Every structure is written in C-alpha cells, then in structure tokens.
Image: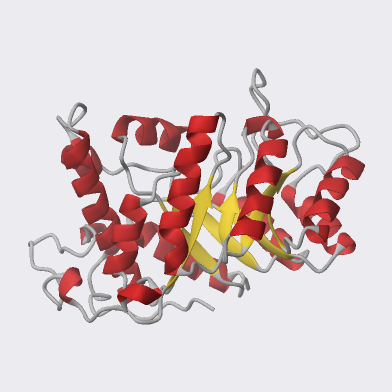
Amino acid sequence: MIHRIPRPDARLDDSTRLLNVARDGRPPLPSMMIAAPLPDDVSVSFEFFPPKSDEAAETLWSAIKRLEPLAPEYVSVTYGAGGTTRERTHATVTRIANETAMAPAAHLTCVGATIDEVDAVAESYWDAGVKHIVALRGDPPAGADRYQPHPGGYAYAADLVTGLKKIADFEISVAAYPEMHPEAGSAEADLDNLKRKIDNGATRAITQFFFDPEVFLRFLDRARAAGITVPIVPGIIPVTNFNMTAKFAKMCGADVPKWMHDLFDGLDDDAETRKLIAASVAAEQCRVLHASGVNAFHFYTMNKADLCYAICHVMGVRSSSAV
C-alpha cells in the first residue's frame, strides 16, 4: 500500500513549492533530488494502446520487448474511444500473455455494448489467463458530445466492477482523477464515485496524469481521509509532443503549469531536445513523489519505450542483466 510520508519541507506553504524548489530558490535537502539515494523499493507498470496498422504493431511490440526486462508489475492495453478497438485490444493482451513473461491487464469499458456482450469479453479474458481488468466507464463514441449509458449495458464503472466480480475473482483497477473528472459535479462527488468503485470490489486506482506532485499528494490525503485504503498509483506521462499533450490535458481536466509551457517553448521542431526535457521533468516528478512515500508508478508509454526505460533507470528499476 502507498502511504504518504511527511516531507522534510512540510513547513512550506503548498503555494510556494515548485516541484522541489521553494520560492526563494533554495530546495530542501538533498539539494538535488537526483542526488538522493537510489530507490530500491519501486514498482512500475506500463500502459500501451492497440496498433492500427502492421507498422504500428511492430513499433508497439518493439516497445513491449524493450520494457519487458524491467519486470513491471503488469502492463495494460487500452480501448479506443467508444470501445472501437475491442478486437485489437484483445489480440494485443493475449499476445502479451502468450509471448512475454509480463502480466497483462485488459481495459474494459461500458461503452457501446450490452451487459451480456461485456461479460462475454471478460469471460474470454479469464479463460485466456488474463486475470486483471482495468474497469472504466469509457469515453463517448465519435460524434457524441457527452456520455450516455448503452441501453442494456453497464451504466458506469462502479456497475462494471460489480459485474466483473460476479463473473470471476478478477484483480480490478479503476481510474482516479487528482484534478477531478471533467464531468464530475464537484471534487467531493468525484471522490465519492471513486470510493463506490473501490467498495464494489476494485483493488487499485490509477490516476489520470498530472505534472505537479503536490496535486497527487493532496489528492492522496483526501482519498485516505475518505476511507479509501487501496493503492492509488500515480499516472506519469513523459511529454514528447507538448502541444498534443496540452490539448489532451485540457480535454481531461489536467492542468499544465506555466513552467511546463516555458520549458517546451520554442521546441516544436526539435524532437531530440524535447525528449531530453521530457525525461528530466518526469524523472524529477517521480523522485519527488518517491521522497514523499510513493513507491509505485504507472507510465503512459504512448507505445514508446526509450523515455520510460530511462526514467525507470533513474528510479532504480533495472533489468536483471543490468544489476
């Protein structure tokens, strides 16, 4: 379980903290988070999306094989918006199960299917040896401006969790939103919904990506105060395409701080420098979180391995051959 450990800079007001640097420019000890002792208790997981072409499939499989030696706790494979990649998701998940040593987790949503249809997919996963489901409400299908439950389907993720537990004893992960789901009525209502999913049988929450570590830590405090005791794993996205990430962040309610805009300013045509900055930012983010007691991280890989591999190295997660 992830616990929050009091930080050495806890006396500082949250508004004065920028990552690990106080307003006066003097960071708490150690002076550089990168100089702190190398973590030896970190676990990681990786998220991929199913390929849309043969070329994309080769890129995906190359990323999977590159990250496999890091022995992630699990790797997950997403659905497309509206559940449009169900078959490709299933094919990717089963290939991971059959051809790697990694434990796959399949995303499953409520969108565009009846309860019987969703249950049949879940049963096929169980029969194929896939015991971990990431249970999500799902995004509206293309052309729809808001989510509507499918007639005869699971209405929301909490209902899907209940249904999955009736089928088999799945390990179930669900989504959490440190900055609130954009459709939630309030932060309190959003947290109540998360607790409902946990109470119905979910065993882990994975957060939407964020960039300010304090956003996650404050959310973790609120969740624990609400009686949510399962692991809450921060979702980390290395930003290789800043404009695309900023656009996506706006859609899902994640704040992109001004300092992020400043760091990536002027680099639209400089992919190599963007990669260096992306790795530095994400590594610092993870080291700050680890110093606050967080020891599990979920990486949104965008089907690219190199940055995630480098960040894991900084976090003490190494392949067995490199130890």
Residue 253 seen: no
Query: Which image quadrant: the N terminus?
Result: bottom right
Task: Please name the residue shown 55% across and 51% down the image.
Answer: 187
The structure's colour scheme is: secondary structure
User: Which part of the image, by quadrant, shows the C terminus?
Assistant: bottom left
Using residue 284 as the reference point, say whether residue 5 is left or right of it.
right
Q: Is residue 232 left or right of residue 294?
A: right
Residue 3 versus residue 64: which sits nearer the camera?
64
**Residue 63 place in picture, x, y as percent:** 43, 49
Which is nearer the eye, 265 or 257?
A: 265
Quarter where residue 320 is shown = bottom left
Q: Is residue 107 left or right of residue 51?
A: right
Please name the residue shown 26% across and 78% down the image: 38
Residue 104 drawn at (x, y percent): 62, 59
Query: What residue appears at the point 73 percent right and 50 percent down from the top-left corner?
Result: 157
Say if residue 26 shows up in the picture: yes
* Closest to the observer, 100 or 224: 100
Where, by quadrant of the figure, is residue 236 drawn? bottom left
Q: Residue at x 22, y 81 (%)?
A: 37
Image coords of residue 129 (percent x, y): 75, 63
**How many marks are shown on the rendered structure?**
0
Name above or below for residue 321 compared with residue 210. Answer: below
